[in-house]
Image (cartoon, grey):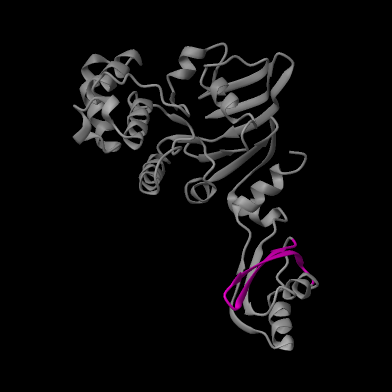
């Protein structure tokens, strides 16, 4: 569905992205991740035809985005990071207007608008002025707009930015529902959401691809570090003893009454749980809790993007 080959974009001597190469197959939900300024939005704007590339090629559904831009864009539904909406229009009016702009046949406009109102849970807001809606509902209107012409591909740039946890969950469930029938490329900073939603992850840093794989394989193949938490009755000197345990990278401590709470960062693939417990027993510490946290996609992301940042 998406094919990117040696894609490069320069602004006045600054290289935003350099020689990007990746593909997204039909029906995939792919997380496009990277720190601020990594080149995510630039790449998405190029793919949607909003921005020309300096060099390289990109195609959508087999159409070159530069040479056959109109044909390619017919397959795309795009939700930018900051959704541009006409706040003085009612939701239904706006979606009918957008459907006409996107070439939906007149006989199908009412049906398509009705479909996306239902899909995005906007039926009860159809006659509401967009300017009166909350941030969450405005995001839903933006998503309904992206879907109104029934595209094969959705490109979503930070679709949950500014939403509360309940709204984020609703958008996540909607995106999962859209997968399979449609291809989805989604940029987000909420990495647990990516693990739940996405079949594959592409990580970009400083304009270059650092990894492209399933979240499971990224966790397996990258030496991301986990952590441990120990709550015990011992003074701050316990940090020195814990730091000497093999596999412990560093230790921080805070007091909670007579208890000390130690947070240990671990070496990649290390599990010093047994050694930590044996140390506590040998020292006679009263232990209230010991917990090991396994590496997450966030740990992998930090590992891939923290260097020379």
Q: Indicate whether 105 appears above or below 137.
A: above
**How many numbered marks are there?**
0
Q: Nearer the viewer, residue 82 or 93?
A: 82
Magenta-tinted stretch: 246-267
Q: Indicate whether 52 appears above or below 228.
A: above
Residue at the image position 63 percent from the left and 16 percent from the top: 53
The answer to whether residue 112 is seen in the rendering is: no
Residue 100 on image: x %, y %: 29, 14
Residue 127 on image: x %, y %: 18, 27
Residue at the image position 59 percent from the left and 48 percent from the top: 214
Residue 234 on image: x %, y %: 67, 80
Q: Residue furthest front?
A: 257
Residue 96 on image: x %, y %: 26, 19
Residue at the image position 77 percent from the left and 39 percent from the top: 308
Residue at the image position 62 percent from the left and 26 percent from the top: 4
Q: Is residue 187 left or right of residue 238?
A: left
> Picture quarter containing residue 296?
bottom right
**Magenta segment includes 251:** yes
**Magenta segment includes 100:** no
Q: Indicate whether 7 appears above or below 157.
A: above
Q: Quadrant of the C terminus?
A: top right
């Amino acid at each position: 569905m998406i094919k990117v080959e040696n894609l490069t974009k320069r602004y006045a001597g600054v290289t935003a992205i350099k020689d990007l190469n990746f593909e997204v197959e039909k029906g995939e939900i792919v997380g496009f991740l990277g720190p601020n300024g990594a080149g995510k939005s630039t790449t998405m704007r190029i793919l949607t035809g909003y921005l020309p590339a300096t060099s390289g090629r990109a195609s959508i559904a087999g159409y070159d985005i530069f040479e056959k831009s109109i044909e390619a864009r017919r397959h795309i539904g795009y939700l930018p990071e900051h959704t541009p909406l006409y706040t003085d229009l009612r939701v239904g009016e706006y979606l009918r207007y957008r459907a006409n702009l996107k070439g939906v046949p007149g006989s199908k406009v009412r049906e398509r608008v009705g479909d996306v109102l239902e899909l995005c849970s906007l039926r009860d807001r159809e006659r509401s002025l967009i300017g009166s809606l909350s941030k969450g509902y405005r995001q839903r209107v933006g998503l309904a707009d992206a879907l109104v012409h029934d595209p094969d591909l959705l490109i979503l740039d930070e679709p949950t930015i500014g939403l509360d946890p309940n709204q984020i969950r609703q958008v996540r469930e909607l995106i999962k529902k859209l997968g399979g029938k449609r291809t989805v490329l989604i940029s987000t900073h909420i990495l647990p959401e990516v693990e739940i939603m996405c079949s594959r992850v592409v990580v970009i840093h400083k304009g270059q691809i650092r990894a492209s794989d399933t979240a499971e394989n990224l966790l397996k193949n990258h030496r991301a570090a986990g952590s441990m938490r120990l709550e015990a009755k011992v003074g701050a000197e316990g940090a020195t003893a814990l730091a000497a345990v093999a596999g412990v990278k560093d230790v921080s401590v805070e007091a909670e009454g007579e208890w000390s709470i130690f947070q240990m960062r671990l070496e990649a693939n290390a599990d010093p749980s047994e050694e930590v417990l044996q140390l506590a027993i040998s020292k006679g510490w009263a232990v209230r809790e010991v917990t090991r946290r396994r590496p997450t996609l966030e740990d992998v992301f930090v590992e891939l993007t923290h260097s020379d940042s």
